Image: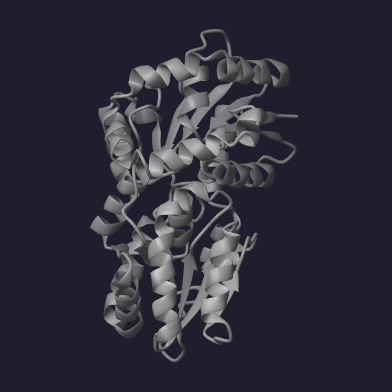
Amino acid sequence: MKKAIIFYASIGSGHYTAALALQAALCEFGAGWQVILKDVFPARARESGLTDLLSALSTTLLARPYTWAWHSGSMAALFQFSARLSWTRQRVLAIVRREQPDVIICTHALPCAILAGERQPRAALLAVSTDLQVHAYWPRRGVDGYVVGSTAAAQRLAKQGAPTEKIRVLGVPVRPEYARMATNRREDTPQMRPTRVLLIAGGGRNGPYLTLWPGLLRFFQSLAEQPLASVEWRLVFGSANWLRARAERMLSGRVDVTILGMTHEMPAHMQWADLVVTKPGGLTVAEALALSKPVVLLKRGAGQEFANTAILTAAGAGKLARGAGVRAQVARLAHNGEVYARMRSAAAQLAHPASSRAIAAWAVALAGGQS
């Protein structure tokens, strides 16, 4: 039996969601494979709230320095120091020694940097970016393959020194069902029915969403005072229960609004929507693009989210809107079929609905199987 380990980091939720998508795809593609998911951080880091704190700091209090460091690589020394810390390094190496995998997939740069530096015979190592652009901290040597989410990311990674023959633009890994839905999708455009808008106001971890909430409360209030003509809403709050309760009080009795908490049916909600309103997180954006959904971004974001915003808006697949601007952008797309069609076409150009399957096939090939 072949074995794969997928390392992720419990900072935010995207790295873990990508790991789950790859696990599902590898189990489908590599019949008989054993696939193990491991967090680079020990359980005590999650339970103490440390990973949530790191995520919140990078997106709120330290947003500008984080963005600068993410793009410039100026914190390389600190990153390398983190890769040498025994509480992460020894954990990762012990897991690999115990499990003896045929291939290792990393959806975060930290475990990848730890393993790339090992010189003894080891499993094939595959680095998988979970955003449309890459930061400067992926290792340049000791990696057998790099998966990136866009042509711009491939160009940047090559410029940083990664071998071009090892880089493939396969997309951010989304769950395999997106490939099936994209294949079976009907061209259903919002002409004779209300435009369906999926707004994501929270997720499994609330840190990255904190700065959105004041503006969203104002938006919900405006929606309560005056519905948006010919628009139907699904509002997803994840674990932000207090915000969900406020929205329910503001919008109670509204037939045009459905309010949801934590959901495990995001592919179905994405399929239902004509338009997605969200922060520019890599996985959520990739899921929307996989089904050719235009995106309205609730903020520019920091670090990787800043980079995602730049790629989406430059391609014409996304629009940035804050506060009252969300209402205006949704109204424009709901009532202007030509603008909507252009954005939908641009989203399709960036889409990689079969990303996790393609990455799984490459992982199998690297492990000595058949691609």
**For residue 96, which quarter of the picture?**
top right
Q: Quadrant of the N terminus?
A: top right
Foreground residue among 202 and 31: 202
Q: Is residue 321 above or below residue 69?
A: below
Residue 261 seen anywhere in this rendered image of the structure: yes
Q: In the picture provided, is 298 more to the left or to the right than 366?
A: left
- Across the whole image, how many numbered discs are drawn on residues? 0
Where residue 306 sits: x, y (%)? 31, 47
State the residue at coordinates (66%, 23%).
Answer: 101
State the residue at coordinates (40%, 88%).
Answer: 191
Foreground residue among 345 and 59: 59
Residue 184 seen anywhere in this rendered image of the structure: no
Where residue 44 sits: x, y (%)? 65, 29
State the residue at coordinates (57%, 40%).
Answer: 360
Residue extending farthest to the bottom is 192
Foreground residue among 357 and 289: 289
Task: Report the coloring of the rendering.
Answer: one colour
State the residue at coordinates (33%, 41%).
Answer: 63
**For residue 330, which quarter of the picture?**
bottom left
**For residue 189, which quarter of the picture?**
bottom left
Where residue 246 sits: x, y (%)? 54, 70
Where residue 74 sits: x, y (%)? 28, 25
Q: Is residue 319 above or below residue 258?
A: above
Residue extending farthest to the top is 120
Q: Is residue 124 above or below residue 254?
A: above
Q: Quadrant of the C terminus?
A: top right
